[in-house]
Amino acid sequence: MAKNAPQALSEAQQEIMEIIWDREEVSVSEVREVLQERRDVARNTVQTMIVRIEQKGWIEHRSIGRTFVYKAIQPRTTTLRQRLDDLMTAAGRGSAEALVTALLEDVSLSTDAADRIRDMIDEAEQRTKKNKKGNR
C-alpha cells in the first residue's frame, strides 16, 4: 500500500464515504438523512463517525456559517486499493498474480473485457519501465 495512504475505513465509515463521494459536499445532517432512509441513526453518531473519517485523512471540511461541510480528499479507488491489498495478503499471500489467477479461473470474460484487461496490463508495464528508468 502507498506510504501516504489514509487509515483503513470500517464498513460504517465506508458507507458514509460513499455518500460523500456521491454528493461531493455534505453536512452531517445531509449524511444522516441518507442513512435514515436505511436505518435509524443518531445525529451524534454520524457526526462522530465523520470526525473520525476526517482524522483518518479521507475528508476535509470548511465552514459555512455554523455548519461544517465535508468533501472527500481521497478518491474511491483508494479504498479499492486497500481492500485489494488486504485480499492479496489474506488469500494470495501478497501475490497479485495468485489473486488474478484465482479470479480468472472461475470467470468467463468477454472479448472486450479481456482486451481491456490486456490494455491495463500493458499500461502498468509501461509505467513500471518508465519508473525504473527514472530511478537510475
Image (spheres, rainbow, N blue to C red):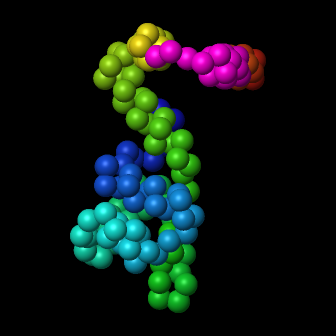
Residue in front for this viewpoint, 109 or 58? 109
Residue at the spot x=67%, y=21% of the render? Answer: 112
Q: Is residue 62 above or below residue 12?
A: below
Instruction: Specify the quadrant of the image occupied by residue 92.
Output: top left
Q: Is residue 11 above or below residue 90?
A: below
Q: Position of residue 15 (x, y in %)?
A: 38, 55
In the rendered image, the residue lying farthest to the bottom is 65
Residue at the spot x=56%, y=49% of the render? Answer: 75
Instruction: Specify the quadrant of the image occupied by residue 87.
Output: top left
Residue at the spot x=32%, y=19% of the render? Answer: 91
Residue at the spot x=24%, y=70% of the render? Answer: 40
Q: Is residue 29 above or below residue 113?
A: below
Is 119 magenta? The answer is yes
Q: Main secondary structure of the magenta part?
A: helix
Image quarter hosting the C terminus: top right
Give the number of marks.
0
Q: Position of residue 19 (x, y in %)?
A: 46, 61
Q: Position of residue 124 (x, y in %)?
A: 66, 21
Magenta residues span 107-123
Is 7 magenta? The answer is no
Q: Position of residue 44 (x, y in %)?
A: 27, 75
Q: Is residue 135 visible?
A: no
Residue in front for this viewpoint, 30 or 124? 30
